[in-house]
Image: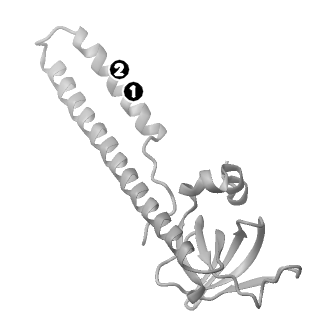
Amino acid sequence: MDSNPVIKPKVATPALILASVAVAIAAAFIPEVRWPGNAGLTIVWAVLLVLAGLIGALWLVRARRRRSWLVEANKRWDRFEEARRTHGTTAEITVLSVDALEPTGSWITINWNRFGHVQRAWLEALAEPIWAGSVLLISPDPGQVRPGMPWPATYFIQASYVFAWAPATVSVPRLGREAIAGAMNFK
């Protein structure tokens, strides 16, 4: 199963923070005990050293994973902006949810970023999977969306009309934290 490339990896979790604090406190109090001590104290030192190494390695792995995710997300946004400059009329939509997957496409719920309009859409199958939280750069179909006309009940997005996608979590300063949090029900 693919991991969701839209979700920013977490570095600090409550369990990791508590484990780090516990090892730090233990490391601060153990030197107060006389050294060299008995075999029990040596075992405690060895366990503490192993735990400190494991926790440190976990922090490093998570930091590297997040750093590589940020680099990839920024590259996606660079490609997104390049596609916006190269193509004529474009629109940004945020995928709020993927409602149903089918071999030929997916039923999704989208938010038109410029208008704040939420609606159901059919997205033809793309070369790579699209996840909730993705921002798609599309060419709006003038046969479906016209100024002064009501929005269609369901918007149909052809695969050839999708130029690029990027994770919405990196675009928070551009789109506004409240707009994304409200639209995706994240608090």
Q: Return the x and y of residue 97 as percentages of the image width and height.
A: 65, 69
Q: Is residue 5 visible in this depiction of the protein? A: no
Say how many tags the image has.
2
Left or right of 116? Residue 60 is left
Asked whether the beta carbons under mark 1 and mark 2 sit within 8 Å of each other, the answer is: yes
Which residue sits at x=31%, y=38%?
A: 55
Taking the image as shown, residue 80 lies to the left or right of residue 89, namely left
Question: What amino acid type is highlighted by mark number 1?
Answer: Val
How was this image coloured?
one colour
Q: What residue is at 13 percent from the left and 15 percent from the top?
A: 38
Helix, strand or loop at disc 1? helix
Depth order, front residue of 176/69: 176
Q: Please determine whether, in this image, residue 27 is positioned above or below residue 164.
A: above
Q: Is residue 162 above or below residue 104?
A: above
Along the line of sight, which residue is nearer the eye, 103 or 90? 90
- Secondary structure type for disc 2: helix
Q: Is residue 49 visible?
A: yes
Say which amino acid is labelled 2: Ile
- Answer above or below: position of 167 versus 21: below
Residue 4 spot, x, y in % from top left: 48, 65
What residue is drawn where x is 68% and y is 53%? 181
Left or right: where does residue 24 sit relative to residue 127?
left
Residue marked by disc 1: 21
Which residue occupies the foreground of this view, 10 or 18? Answer: 10
3D distance between C-alphas at marks 1 and 2 = 6 Å
Residue 6 on image: x %, y %: 51, 63
Mark seen at residue 25: 2
